[in-house]
Amino acid sequence: MKRTLGLLFAATIATAAPGFAMAGGENNIGSCGWGSKLFEGESGIFAQVLAVTTNGTSANQTFGITSGTSGCTQDGTVSSTWKTAMFIDGNKEALAKAISAGQGETLDALAALIGIDEKHKADFSRVSQANFARIFPSTNVSAAEIRASLKEVVSADAGLAQYSAKI
């Protein structure tokens, strides 16, 4: 009985794991699967969990990716922005100083982490500095808010918009 429960648990985790990475939201890989479609536009943990559960329990996202259905494509890129979020969280004050100055080691490190090409680095610094008040509206701003604002600012710039998905 214990072995059966263990196998059932392992099977559940194995089928649900892709759903955790691919359910609705900003970190959604491909924004596809029935869960992502059923809960499209919804936000919050409840909608995320329902989307993950829907995708994970029926393996419809796996089918969608392999068959090109349910809003899935076969040419998607797996990506994650957790490194950027962790960097901002750990370097918030230094990043604020660097962005306000329009230069600095922390701003260079963030640009490298995002993957900003050397030819766009000066534009990234300039755009970030020009939008400092938007990125850091207060001293109590959270790392998540900084990341979201930075992403909006980069998305709005035609030359830098290509990097916004990596923020």
Image (cartoon, rainbow, N blue to C red):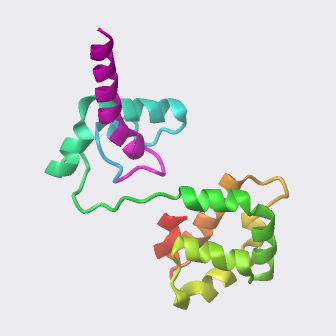
> Residue at 46% across / 51% down in the picture?
27
Of helix, strand and loop, which mostly describes the magenta segment? helix
Question: Considering the image in quadrants, where does the N terminus appear?
Answer: top left
Residue sticking out furthest to the top = 1
> Residue at 46% across / 36% down in the picture?
48
Stretch in magenta:
1-29
Q: Is residue 103 above or below residue 12?
A: below
> Residue at 17% across / 52% down in the picture?
68
Front one among 62 and 155:
62
Front one among 24 and 13:
13
The percent position of residue 111, horizontal first and vertical second, equals 60, 76
Front one among 86 and 162:
86
The answer to whether residue 27 is magenta is: yes
Residue sticking out furthest to the bottom = 119
Q: Is residue 128 visible?
A: no
Q: Quadrant of residue 56?
A: top left
> Residue at 32% across / 28% down in the picture?
10
Q: Is residue 14 above or below residue 80?
A: above
Left or right: 164 as drawn, with respect to 33 = right
Q: Is residue 79 above or below residue 133?
A: above
Q: Is residue 56 visible?
A: yes
